[in-house]
Each structure stands twice: as C-alpha cells, then as structure tokens.
Image (cartoon, helix red, strand yellow):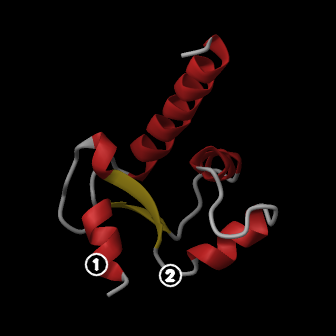
Amino acid sequence: MSKHLEQNKKYRLRLRKEVMNHYGEKCNCCGENIFEFLAIDHIDGKGNEHRKQIDNKYKHHIPSTVMYRWLIKNNFPDGFQILCHNCNIAKHH
C-alpha cells in the first residue's frame, strides 16, 4: 500500500474513532459493539437529504471521511446515533 493511501486510512480511522466515541461506541438498538460493524445513522431517516446538503458533488453517497469531518466540525449535533449495519438495514424495512 502506498504511503499516501496508508495515511488516508489512518486519518479516516482516527476520525471514525472520534465520532464513534462521542455517540456511544455501540449500536443504539441491539448493543453490538464490534467497531467494524457500526455505522452512523440519521435518526430522522433523512440521510440522503442531509448528505446532499453537506456536499452535493456526490450523487448518492459521500465518503465517510466527509461525514465524520462534518460531525466533528459541527460539535457532534443531535439527530445522529450509532447503529450496527444489521439494525441500520432493518430500520428501513
């Protein structure tokens, strides 16, 4: 892996850890706490709308680093929670 890619990976991981630490480090639904299984969720379900407001150059998905930086820059606003990927998918069914 190139040095640049390795630095980006470490940077993203540092941001992710900071965000997960703030929002509780476990799934708000089932309690899953394996770091790799966790994701940030928009509680109100308006994630697509919010992502377009953050950065509209990405049509369907913004990089996680952009979202993590936004959460940190905005002092970890209310309206977000941690869900594991299973609970996050189940929420939409």
Q: Mark 2 points at which residue?
A: 44
Q: Quadrant of the N terminus?
A: top right
Most extreme residue toward the right, as rendered?
Answer: 57
Q: In which quarter of the image is the C terminus?
A: bottom left
Q: Is residue 81 shown above or below 17?
A: below
User: Residue, x 62% and y 26% (percent of image)?
Assistant: 8
Does residue 28 appear anywhere in the picture?
Answer: no
Q: Is residue 73 left or right of residue 42?
A: right
Closest to the camera, between mark 2 and mark 1, is: 1
Disc 1 secondary structure class: helix
User: Residue, x 67% and y 72% (percent of image)?
Assistant: 50
Measured as percent of width and height from the top left, residue 79 is found at 52, 71
Label 1 CA crowd tier, 10 Å (few <14, some 14–19, many 20+): few
Most extreme residue toward the bottom, as rendered?
Answer: 93
Question: First in sequence: mark 2 or mark 1?
Answer: 2
Residue 76: mark in rendering: none
User: Residue, x 77% and y 70% (percent of image)?
Assistant: 53
Q: Mark 1 points at which residue?
A: 90
Q: Distance between the residues labelled 2 and 1?
A: 15 Å
User: Residue, x 27% and y 52% (percent of image)?
Assistant: 26
Disc 2 secondary structure class: loop
Q: Nearer the viewer, residue 74 or 37?
A: 37
Label 2 CA crowd tier, 10 Å (few <14, some 14–19, many 20+): few
Measured as percent of width and height from the top left, residue 15 is found at 55, 36
Three-letter code, disc 2: Asp
Three-letter code, disc 1: Ala
Q: Is residue 38 left or right of residue 55?
A: left
Q: Is residue 67 shown above or below 53?
A: above
Most extreme residue toward the top, as rendered?
Answer: 3
- Are the two marked residues, 2 and 1, in contact with CB atoms closer than 8 angstroms? no
Q: Is residue 31 shown above or below 29?
A: above
Measured as percent of width and height from the top left, residue 86 is found at 26, 66
